[in-house]
Amino acid sequence: TRVDDFLTSPVPGLAVTPLQFGGVVWILGSVFFFVRFLWSYGKFRKLLYSFAPLEEDDGSPYGEAQALAEQMGLPGFTIYMTGIVRSPTVTGFFHPIVLFPLYPYSSEDYQNALEHEFTHWINRDIWVKLLVELLRDIFWWNPLVYLLKYDLNQTLELKCDLTIAKKRDLD
């Protein structure tokens, strides 16, 4: 057919077909997005470890957090208070690291936020987000992948909230 002929015939003056050219652009774009992701993640980790974690003896509600982590079956965790986040968030693929903004939380708000972030970690949401990031790196040219990434973040938040709500209803 005409489309097949167009895609598989060399471009006049070049030794490549449009299909080969498109494949090279796709691969180069994927490599670019993957390297950009790794660079951003490395920068984030370097920044993260420049902060001092909360400890039991610094007057923070670390003890409450420890009790909650044991109750939820977490292996251990680290908490940072930092100005780089606007709301509590969790990171760490193998060890939960909770980031809190520099904001004076009440004890109840602190516990609720910790439970929410620990639930994200228990649900392995960070691994799901990593998978979607890798899909985005591969299919960078497809706008549906960007919608998937946005919608998935919203869905993971709702799933986490529902998990906590169900647990509290049972209690």
Image (spheres, rainbow, N blue to C red):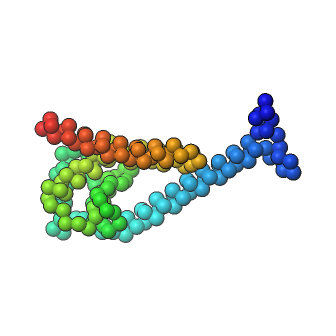
In terms of depth relative to the viewer, which is nearer, 45 or 154?
Answer: 154
In this rendering, would 30 be left or right of 58? right
At 37% from the left edge and 64% from the top edge, which residue is drawn? Answer: 48
In terms of depth relative to the viewer, which is nearer, 56 or 128?
Answer: 128
Task: Using the rendered view, name the quadrant where residue 123 is placed.
Answer: top left
Look at the picture and state if 37 lies above or below 128: below
In this rendering, would 121 be left or right of 37? left
At 78% from the left edge and 30% from the top edge, which residue is drawn? Answer: 1
In this rendering, would 155 be left or right of 145? left
Residue 91, percent from left and from top: 36, 54
Residue 8, percent from left and from top: 79, 38
At 51% from the left edge and 61% from the top edge, which residue is drawn? Answer: 39
Q: Residue furthest right?
A: 13
Residue 122 visible (yes or no):
no
Residue 72, percent from left and from top: 22, 44
At 18% from the left edge and 62% from the top edge, which residue is drawn? Answer: 105
Q: Residue furthest left?
A: 171
**Screen quadrant of the C terminus:** top left
Residue 151, percent from left and from top: 41, 44
